Amino acid sequence: MREYFIETPGAVRDSLHSMVLILRTAVLSDLGLRRGNNEDSTYVGRRLLVVADGMGGAPAGELASDLAVSALAELDEADTGEDLVATLQAGFEAASEQIRAAAEDDAVRDGMGTTVTALLFGAERAALMHVGDSRGYLFREGVLTQLTRDDTYVQALVDQGVITAEMARNHPQRALVTQAMQGRPIEPLAVTLTPKAGDVFLLCSDGLSDVVTDEAITAILSTGPDLDARARALVDAAIEGGGPDNVTVVLAEVSAD
Ligand code: CA
């Protein structure tokens, strides 16, 4: 038997917006069927969501994703005004420094790192910052849009027109990450947008997106309205697809009630 754990059971309700937008969230992380430890970490707070997928072998991978998430969690209470990208940038720098310092402490941690996908809500806008291959999606009016771009070798091949996105899905080197938070300088991607009532944001590790197609994710998100049920259905789909990796899903729904 495998056990699920939901880190924030039920809905977290909080005033997000100077108007009446409310953020409800669901989080689910599963070991998957082939891994002995879970290197994914999450943070789900009042206005901040983070998914991090550690690398570098146990226990360094777990430590790296945990350090990144802990450092970024401080942004949840930061007084940022509306300069969300600068806030996230500062958080990424602080997190990266934590990883650099921890790697220096112990040779076993040499080369450890983590993906980071973080979404921060302000009064009017939201900003996403990203490095690595954990993804952020926006599900709006029935349409799923990937907000992140994988920092992977196969994504670079797709961008250059060498292979198609479909070929990337089964490429033998699809796990090769070209950029991650490892304590060295990085160039994270930043995206800003204006959330609307009805939006559902999905942050996930590659344990979901490598196994479950965008079409299948869209179908599951369309089943609404229960956010926990949809998070569970996403994780179940990854497990049914073989569960080769840790699977982590964060869902956040913007509502106007
Ligand atoms: Ca992974």
Image (tube, rainbow, N blue to C red):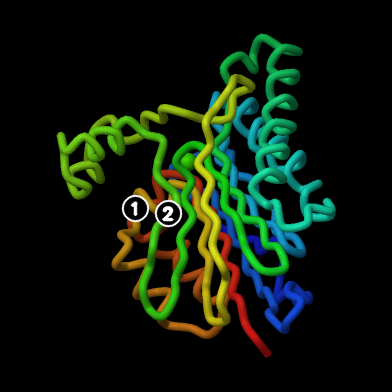
Please provide percent x and percent y for residue 143. Answer: 36, 73
Residue 181 vs 76, above or below: the answer is above
Please provide percent x and percent y for residue 86. Answer: 68, 43
Residue at image coords 66%, 64%: 6
Residue under numbered circle 2: 208
Residue under numbered circle 1: 211
- Mark 1 to mark 2 CA distance (whole Å): 6 Å
Closer to us: 193 or 146: 193
Quarter of the figure with the N terminus? bottom right
Amino acid type for the residue under numbered disc 1: Val
Q: Are marks 1 and 2 in contact (CB under 8 Å)?
A: yes
Please provide percent x and percent y for residue 187. Answer: 52, 31
Element type at marker 2? helix
Q: Can residue 29 be seen in this view?
A: yes
Residue at image coords 74%, 20%: 102
CA neighbours of label 2 inside 10 A, class few (<14), some (14 to 19), many (20+): many
Residue 38, quarter of picture: top right
Q: Can residue 1 be seen in this view?
A: no
From the Cβ of disc 1, is ligand 1 less than 8 Å away?
Answer: no
Closer to us: 248 or 186: 186
What is the number of the mark on residue 233?
none
Please provide percent x and percent y for residue 254. Answer: 61, 76
Element type at marker 1? loop
Residue 46, quarter of picture: bottom right
Give the left or right position of residue 156, taking residue 54 as reference.
Answer: left
Give the left or right position of residue 19, taking residue 57 as reference.
Answer: right
Quarter of the figure with the C terminus? bottom right
CA neighbours of label 1 inside 10 A, class few (<14), some (14 to 19), many (20+): many
Amino acid type for the residue under numbered disc 2: Leu
From the Cβ of disc 2, is ligand 1 less than 8 Å away?
Answer: no
Residue at image coords 72%, 45%: 87
Residue 148 vs 63, above or below: the answer is below
